[in-house]
Image: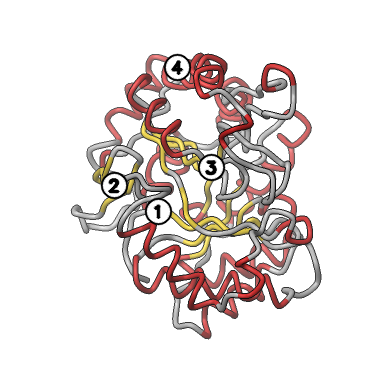
Amino acid sequence: MDRRAFLQVLGAATGTLVGFSAESDLKIQTVMGPVSSTTLGLTLSHEHVLVDFVGAELVGPHRYVIEDVLAAIRPHVEQAYRSGVRAIFECTPAFLARDVRLLRRLSEETGVHFVTNTGLYGVRNNLFLPPYAHTETARQLADRWIREARVGIDGSDIRPGFIKSGVDVTPQLSPHHRKLVEAAALTHRETGLTIAVHTGRGPGLEALDVLKGADVSPNAFVWVHAQNALDDALFAAADRGAWLSFDGINTPTLTRHLHLCREMKRRGLLGQVLISHDAGWFDPAKPGGGSFRPYDLLFSAFLPMLRADGFSEDEIRLLLVSNPAQAFAVRQR
């Protein structure tokens, strides 16, 4: 199938989503406001626009010029739009240069829906946690995130569309990281926002146990960077009902991603898979923002691999249209 025919198939899919529930009033919260989950369109479920790894104590908008960032990033978003992308979940958390006004500008100027997040990111031994995260309880952290969901982020009226947290790759959740998962559970129970946790090869099953203890369904949990984990752990999480995000599509990983999609299809669990690049991003610490990795390899390399492996257009539509809309539709689970 050529690119034009593929886009026509995807366009037809936005009316009735394969495998989607009959609840037609479910919404995705974008930076421009709520959008019907049934019309979201082709979605990249894990990407980045701007990321600054300087640490929570130093990060801030004083480290970049927003017009420079827009000029560098806009062409890549426009190219994604030409490839059929209509929505991008921007997964940069607070204290790593989450900039919701930048995302709104990009959405206004390109026509792509952007979805931002609330939550805190504990990876790299808590380098990106603000001081209050070390002393506040899970309830207090959740109250902060719930305020963002109900009122807006950083003095704006822009609300998050999901919860983004991160835990280190350790055999067990640390006390701080368990608290982050507990706070995410409390936030989900009051807002219906999906919980996406940067887990990788980390304790994803333990995170699911924490959610279970808070009476939150595994279906509200996205195992982020799942391609880096052991197969047995991933499939056990999927069997419980969790979403698996195979979001690191890059040239060296294509075979791994194909294996995981193939195996989830064989197990009848393809409806719980998200695929994306984890690409971008403008880095204020580097001249000119560094080398931006575009959002294109999915279309130029990975989709042809899926088709050659026998994946149908309906199955590809499931991965790129239906699954993201189902995973991130705002509702309590």
Q: Which of the 4 image quarters holds residue 134?
A: bottom right
Label 2, residues with CA under 10 Å away: few <14, some 14-19, many ≥20: many
Q: Quick one: label 1 or label 3, which is nearer the N terminus?
A: 3
Label 3 sits on a secondary structure element that is: loop
Q: Are marks 4 and 2 in contact (CB under 8 Å)?
A: no
In this figure, which residue is indicated by the disc labeled 2?
37
As drawn, which residue projects farthest toward the front? 62
Measured from the top left, where is residue 217 in percent x and y? 45, 74
Q: Looking at the image, tell me whether mark 3 or mark 2 is earlier in sequence order.
A: 2
**Rounded to the nearest whole Å, what is the CA distance between mark 1 and mark 3?**
19 Å
Helix, strand, or loop for circle 1? helix
| 130 w.r.t. 45: above or below | below
Specify the amino acid type for callout 3: Arg
Residue that appears at 47% across and 50% down:
117
Give the colour scheme shown: secondary structure
Residue bearing the label numbered 1? 328
- Whether pointer 1 and pointer 4 mark residues with C-beta atoms closer than 8 Å, the reply is no
Name the amino acid, label 4.
Answer: Glu
- Residue that appears at 71% across and 20% down: 291
Q: As shown in the figure, which amino acid type bears the numbered disc 1?
A: Phe
Q: CA distance from mark 1 to mark 2?
A: 8 Å
Cα distance, mark 4 to mark 2? Answer: 22 Å
Q: In percent of the image, x 69 and y 62: which residue is there?
A: 167
C-alpha separation, residue under disc 1 versus residue under disc 4: 23 Å
**SS at circle 2:** helix
First in residue order: circle 1 vs circle 4: 4
Reading the image, the residue beneath label 3 is 98
Q: CA distance from mark 3 to mark 4?
A: 21 Å
- Mark before the other along the chain sequence, 4 or 2: 2
Which of the marked residues, 3 or 4, is nearer the chain's N terminus?
A: 4
